[in-house]
C-alpha cells in the first residue's frame, strides 16, 4: 500500500547539522518533496528533487535520494532555532500527494 | 505573491451539524485538494478535484463528505453530519497541472474544525 514513513522526533543543538529521513513506496513518483510546517500554519514547500537525481543542494539544505532503497533524506546544515518545525516528506502520485508522518525538529540553543 | 486562502480559520460545531469549509485556490491553478490533519498526526489525503469532478478520493472521504466548485474561484468541502472524529485541521491546496514544472502543492493556512 501507499505509505511514507518518517521518524517522529529529532533534537539537535544550534549550529549542528540535522538529518531527517524518509522512506516512500511509489517507485514511479517523478518528484519528491520536503515541506515545512511551523506551529499553527500550513505546509510550505522547502525543496524538491526530481526522481532521476541523486542529490540536490539548495543553500543550507541537501536532499539525498536513493531510489533503489526508496529512501529520501533532508540535511539542514548549521541548524538554527528558526528551523524548529515539523518536516514532511511527500511523494507525488497521479492525482494526489502522499505525505509522511512528519518529523518534529527541535533545535536547542 | 498569490496564495491559497481558507475560511473560517476556526469553526466549532455540534455533532450532527453540517459544516462547509471554504477555499479560494490560486487563480491559474487547475487541481484542487483537501487534506486533513488530526492534532499531532499525519497529513491525510481526502480528495483531489480537476475539471469539475473528483479525480481521486481516500477511504476517509465517505458519503458524509462532498466537494464543490460553485463558481470560478471558490472550492468548498462540506461535511453533512459531523462526528467527533471529524475534529481536525483541514487544509486546502492547489497546484498547476501536476505534470508541468515541479507540481508544487500550495497550501492554505487551514481551517480548524472542532466538533463537540
Image (cartoon, coloured by chain):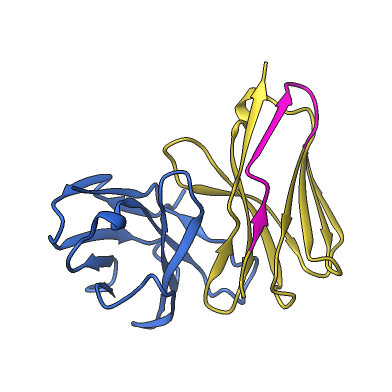
Q: Residue at point 76% right, 65% down? A: A50
Give the left or right position of residue B7, taking residue A97 as reference: left
From which residue to which does the magenta span run?
A4-18
Q: Tell me the residue at 79%/60% (across/down).
A: A71
Residue B100 pos. (x, y %): 62, 74
Left/right placement of residue A19 relative to residue A35 reads right
Split into 4 quadrants, where in the image is the N terminus of chain A? Answer: bottom right
Give the number of marks.
0
Of residue B86 and residue B32, the one placed in the foreground of this image is B86
Q: Residue furthest top?
A: A109
Residue B21: in magenta span: no
The structure residue drawn at horizontal position 51% and vertical position 53%, both measured from the top left corner, is B42
Compared to residue B38, the image places residue B93 above or below, namely: below
Q: Is residue B105 left or right of residue A34?
A: left
Tell me: residue A49, above or below residue B98. above
Where the C terminus of chain A falls, by quadrant? top right
Q: Tell me, by letter, which chain the rendering colours yellow.
A: A
- Location of residue B21 in the rendering, given as x and y in whole percent from the top left corner: 25, 59
Residue A86 against residue A63 in the figure, above or below: above
Q: Is residue A45 left or right of residue B19?
A: right
Instruction: Report if residue A7 lies within the magenta region.
Output: yes
The residue shown at (35%, 73%) is B61
Residue A75 pos. (x, y %): 78, 42
For this rendering, which residue is in front, B57 or B86?
A: B86
Q: Position of residue B45 (x, y in %)?
A: 46, 66
For this rendering, which residue is in front, A33 or A70? A70
Q: Colour of chain B?
A: blue
| Residue at the limit of the structure toward the front, as seen here | B84
Amino acid at each position: 500500500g501507499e505509505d511514507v514513513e518518517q521518524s517522529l522526533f529529532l533534537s539537535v543543538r544550534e549550529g549542528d547539522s540535522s538529518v531527517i529521513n524518509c522512506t516512500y513506496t511509489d517507485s514511479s513518483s517523478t518528484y519528491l518533496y520536503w515541506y515545512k510546517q511551523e506551529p499553527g500554519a500550513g505546509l510550505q514547500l522547502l525543496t524538491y528533487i526530481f526522481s532521476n537525481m541523486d542529490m540536490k543542494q539548495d543553500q543550507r539544505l541537501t536532499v539525498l535520494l536513493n531510489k533503489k532503497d526508496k529512501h529520501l533524506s533532508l540535511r539542514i546544515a548549521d541548524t538554527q532555532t528558526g528551523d524548529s518545525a515539523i518536516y514532511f516528506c511527500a511523494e507525488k502520485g497521479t492525482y494526489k500527494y502522499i505525505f509522511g508522518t512528519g518529523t518534529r525538529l527541535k533545535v536547542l540553543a | 505573491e498569490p496564495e491559497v486562502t481558507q475560511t473560517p480559520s476556526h469553526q466549532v460545531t455540534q455533532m450532527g451539524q453540517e459544516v462547509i469549509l471554504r477555499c479560494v485556490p490560486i487563480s491559474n491553478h487547475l487541481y484542487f485538494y483537501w487534506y486533513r490533519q488530526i492534532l499531532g498526526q499525519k497529513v491525510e489525503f481526502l480528495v483531489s478535484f480537476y475539471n469539475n469532478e473528483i479525480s481521486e478520493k481516500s477511504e476517509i472521504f465517505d458519503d458524509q463528505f462532498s466537494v464543490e466548485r460553485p463558481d470560478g474561484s471558490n472550492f468548498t468541502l462540506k461535511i453533512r453530519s459531523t462526528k467527533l472524529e471529524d475534529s481536525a485541521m483541514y487544509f486546502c491546496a492547489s497546484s498547476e497541472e501536476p505534470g508541468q514544472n515541479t507540481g508544487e502543492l500550495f497550501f492554505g493556512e487551514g481551517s480548524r474544525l472542532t466538533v463537540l
